[in-house]
Amino acid sequence: MSRLADTVGGLSKEALARFLDQSLACPKCRGRLVNGPDGYLCQSCKSKFFRSASYVDFLDFSDPILARAQIDFTDHYVPLETPYWVALRMATEKYSSSLPAFFSGLFPRPVRCLDIGASHIAAGRIKPHLQAYERVLSVYCAIDPDPNQLARQDDRLFIGRAVGEFLPFGDEAFDLVLVHATLDHCFDYRKALDELTRVLTPGGVVSIYLNNDRSWAKRLLPREAARCRQLAAGHHHVFLGPDMLIEEMQKRSFEILRLQGMRYLLLPSSILEMFPRLFGSWTSRILELVDRAGTWIAPSLGGDFHLFARKR
């Protein structure tokens, strides 16, 4: 791993400050950033990036290329509280909470992590069911373009307003990059993949979680799949399946470590809402078992998929 991989974990203000001093870079020209009283100044192109109480703003909307960037996800984060969706959230959180142990098995020491999409924080802190990450990480940085998602209550974390296509970090800065429910929102997903490859150290791991455009349900019901794509077009710039993403990662010299299928019970909501009435508190456990069987039989056919890959 690169020069910073021997950072001692877990999370601390001091480790974060050392990391930022060495690893922040201008998202426009990749020049070195100098910390000032109200933000950062690029020594090369002289761009300024201002700091609020919660985050550093790296987005410059005078750049026409950012006109396609989605910056408001407010309606996307409205949680559904029907019995089925509560059970699904319980099953999903149980799966997510198992991932720190998986990652600790891949790395000999705590790692520097970039979360593109800020999927692991809520209300400015690492989500309660994900706090085991604190034992796995030495540095945690999150970026998202939506300022409504960027509150920070833990000064051991770095939060930046940025997009995956223009990451404000130097080359080989991270050992682990998380891109969960985010890549299909990027206005240029291939450039986002190029950027995460650039900031990932050799031997580092990327974790990508996505809705599956080639699920069994979408293959079986192409008209319904087309309708779903049309409904999602306001938030999604691309629709990917596992094979397409694996091909893109292999082009970038990644070794595929694991493909996990998720959410195999993609049925009409009227049927899904019957599950809690039939199975009560067992609903989330049944969803787990179906996903476990589905990923063993056909990992590429779930409603969502989770890909883990290592940079060679």
Image (tube, rainbow, N blue to C red):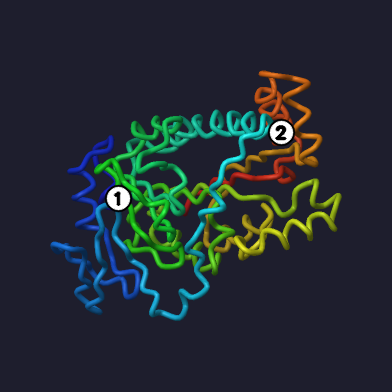
What residue would you read off at disc 1? 158
Q: Which mark is residue 287?
A: none
What residue would you read off at disc 2? 296
Most foreground residue, 140 or 248? 140
Name which of mark 1 and mark 2 comes first in the sequence. 1
Q: Around disc 2, counting alpha carbons within 10 Å, would you say few (fewer than 14), some (14 to 19), or many (20 or more)?
A: few
Of the residues tagged 1 and 2, which is closer to the observer? 1
Q: Distance between the residues labelled 1 and 2?
A: 37 Å
- Quadrant in the picture for residue 187: bottom right
* 285 in relation to 88, above or below: above
- Quadrant in the picture for residue 161: bottom left
What is the x, y in percent for residue 127?
A: 42, 36
For the point 59% across and 59% down, the residue is 184
For the point 20% across and 70% down, the residue is 41
Helix, strand or loop status at disc 1: strand
For the point 28% across and 41% down, the residue is 154
What is the x, y in percent for residue 18?
A: 19, 50
Which residue type carries mark 2? Trp
What is the x, y in percent for residue 32?
A: 23, 68
Q: Which residue lies furthest to the left in this view?
A: 37
Classify residue 304 as left or right of residue 187. Answer: right
Most foreground residue, 286 or 277? 277
Which residue type carries mark 1? Phe
* 176 in relation to 134, above or below: below
Most foreground residue, 201 or 271? 271
Number of residue marks: 2
Helix, strand or loop status at disc 2: helix
For the point 67% across and 40% down, the residue is 261
